[in-house]
Amino acid sequence: MARRLTRRTATRGAIALACAVSVTTGAFTGTGSAAPAEPDGAGASGRHELTKTLATTCPFAAPVGPLELAVKTTASLPASMTVGQPATIDGLVVTFSLPRAAAQQLLGTGSTLEGGLTFQLLLEQGKVKDTRTVPMTIAATGLPAEGDLSLVATGKLPAFSPSTAGVLRIRVTAPKLALGLTGAPPDQPAEQVTCAADGGQDLSFGSVAVLAAAPTAAGKPAPEKKAVPGPRPAGPQKHSLLDEEPPPDDTTTMVLPLQPNQVDNTSTIAKTGATIRSKPAALANGVWLNITDSGGFPVRSEITGELAFAPVTVSYLGYGFLPISATVEFLPVDYRDSTMIHSFGTLFDGLLRNHLEVVSRLSDVKVNGVPLDAGPDCVSETPMPIDMMGEYDPFGGGFIRTDPNNPDPKFRGFTLPPFKNCGAAEKLSSLFTGQNSGPGNQASARLTIIPLCAEADHRNCPPVTPIPPEVFRKSR
């Protein structure tokens, strides 16, 4: 997404190699001058107090099993907004009740449940659409003496600015849940559940009138802003619904290419105990976006980049006794059209919170040495979101990981989804799912700055991992 930078922006360089998580925002840029139509059921001033209840099905693991939950979302929306001016959606609260029997199963010998919840606001204005993901927190809650367990999730959505006049319509989606025992040990990670809205429901949450900004005098720039040339008449135009809230005018922005980072990644699968040590990889197109205020304090700091993992062979004991080996790959979500995995992270006070989504693929499976044809496209049914955090220095590297004890549920581990399309001669998806899929898997990544070689003759430079030393020697 193209970032809108302020007039004191200091920009350096192009894109090199390097490293990389949070609220998803679209980049809708558009124009509009006509007054919008009246939003459904809304006046032209004040705020709306909106409520929406969705009937959802949430597939908890056994022994709880799938639950039908009524998920209620409430919020306060402005009745009208103005193009280019920040506005907020306040008072976001999501509530739902777990049946008493299910709550008792989740609690076990524990006393309270806690966790997190995310859902999406789908924004539409004509044919233009955008999405904002809302992360929320569920505070520790104990089972009452009688009745079901009522859980309350609270959170805040950053302000945003509409870029086009019209009627902004908002819909909601079913949530993703993460529930676990308060103070649970590492071997009891929070259970992550992706709920689905039952069919036949209206997902509409509300609408907001977006008013055109007051025009400035012809030929004159807006107050305290420099005149800028108009858009070029030729070439395609990008259209979007929202502009990110711009930083204040007294901020300084730096966009820095990062020196190459080597990534050594390790993953552990909870069900089998298998450890996947990926071959060393490099992060490409590494960029550090750093925005600070007039006092030098960070306003926004992001690390982005792309990476690709080579296939790796993993051996483990199926069901605790049966020798199994397989080639495992971590691929981008659009793996049929792309080879690079996008990585995004926020960096504050030396702590990197990193996010990526991957698809897992299995091949070359052998059971007790006997080949088992998994087929050409034995992959996880859905992408795996993996969130890691840890200390990181853009000029020195660092170490990030999941942690079962992290207070934020999304950093406690990742869930390996069920598999699909497995088996050329026989259906094997359920077998691989039963052996491997489930929550509580762990991941870590060590990021090391790859030193640049200053030798005039490149043949005198030492081998740079991830190029294997034997390959480097043969190239001399």
Image (tube, grey):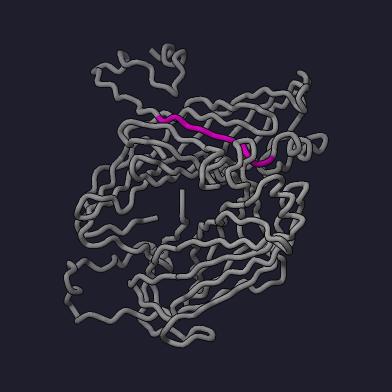
Residue positioned most to the front? 145
Q: Which of the pair 200/16 is nearer the observer?
A: 200
In the rendered image, residue 412, in percent from the top left (x then y), is placed at 55, 41
- Please say whether residue 166 is one of the residues in the magenta stretch: no
Q: Which of the pair 100/45 is nearer the observer?
A: 100
Residue 313, image quadrant: top right
In the rendered image, residue 109, in percent from the top left (x then y), is placed at 70, 45
Q: Taking 42 as reference, is 329 left or right?
A: right
Q: Residue at x 71, y 65 (%)?
A: 198
Q: Taking 216 as reference, is 343 left or right?
A: right
In what quadrant of the picture does the C terminus appear?
top left
Magenta part of the chain: 438-447
Secondary structure mostly seen in the magenta stretch: strand
Q: Taking 408 as reference, is 176 left or right?
A: right
Q: In the image, is residue 420 above or below residue 157?
A: above
Residue positioned most to the right? 426
In the rendered image, residue 34, in percent from the top left (x then y), is placed at 38, 83
Q: Is residue 79 visible?
A: yes
Q: In the image, is residue 143 above or below residue 18?
A: below
Q: Residue at x 54, y 77 (%)?
A: 50
Q: In the image, is residue 218 above or below residue 68?
A: below
In the rendered image, residue 293, in percent from the top left (x then y), is placed at 23, 55
Q: Residue at x 37, y 62 (%)?
A: 244
Q: In the image, is residue 325 above or below residue 433?
A: above
Q: Is residue 382 visible?
A: no
